[in-house]
Every structure is written in structure tokens, then in C-alpha cells.
Amino acid sequence: MEQKIFLKVASVIFGIVAIVHLLRVASSWSLVIENFAVPMWVSYLAVILIGYMSYQGCKLAKANK
């Protein structure tokens, strides 16, 4: 797969995941995995980190012509 296409696909996937975490924060959805309640701060952190990864991927795909 061409690097530019890979960067675009990865950026879109990261963006979708960041949006889902943002929706979780905005809607106060609870998340339980195997009897473990995931704290809300995990989604705050995920929005920042994964959103940044999505942004950087888009930036790299644009620069990689």
C-alpha cells in the first residue's frame, strides 16, 4: 500500500475513535470492560492523544506528495 494512502486511512480511523471518545465524554456514557469501569479521564486523555495522532497523520499525508 502506498504510504500516502496508509496515512490517510490511519488518520481517518484515529479521527473516528477520537470522536467516539469525545461523544462518551459529552454524553457521560459509562464503559465497563470485564467488570472494570473505565474512568472518564481515560477518554479525556484518548481524545487528546488520538486526536493529535489523527491530525499529525493528515499533516504527514499532505506533505507526502
Image: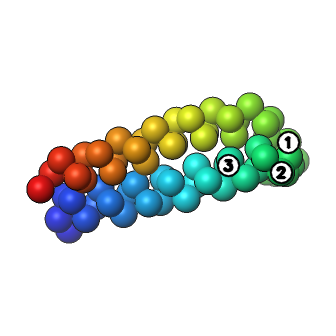
Identify whether 21 is placed above or below 40. below
Tell me which label, 2 or 1, sits earlier in the chain.
2
Q: Residue at x 73, y 53 (%)?
A: 23
Q: Can you name the residue that lies furthest to the left here?
A: 65
Q: Position of residue 31 (x, y in %)?
A: 81, 50
Residue at disc 3, secondary structure: helix
Label for residue 27?
2
Residue carrying label 1: 37
Mark 1 residue type: Ala
**Quadrant location of the C terminus in the rendered image:** bottom left
Residue carrying label 3: 21
Mark 3 residue type: His
Q: Position of residue 48 (x, y in %)?
A: 56, 35
Give the mark toward the camera: 3 or 2.
2
Q: Is residue 32 visible?
A: no
Q: Position of residue 12 (x, y in %)?
A: 44, 60
Figure quadrant of residue 10: bottom left
Give the mark toward the camera: 2 or 1.
2
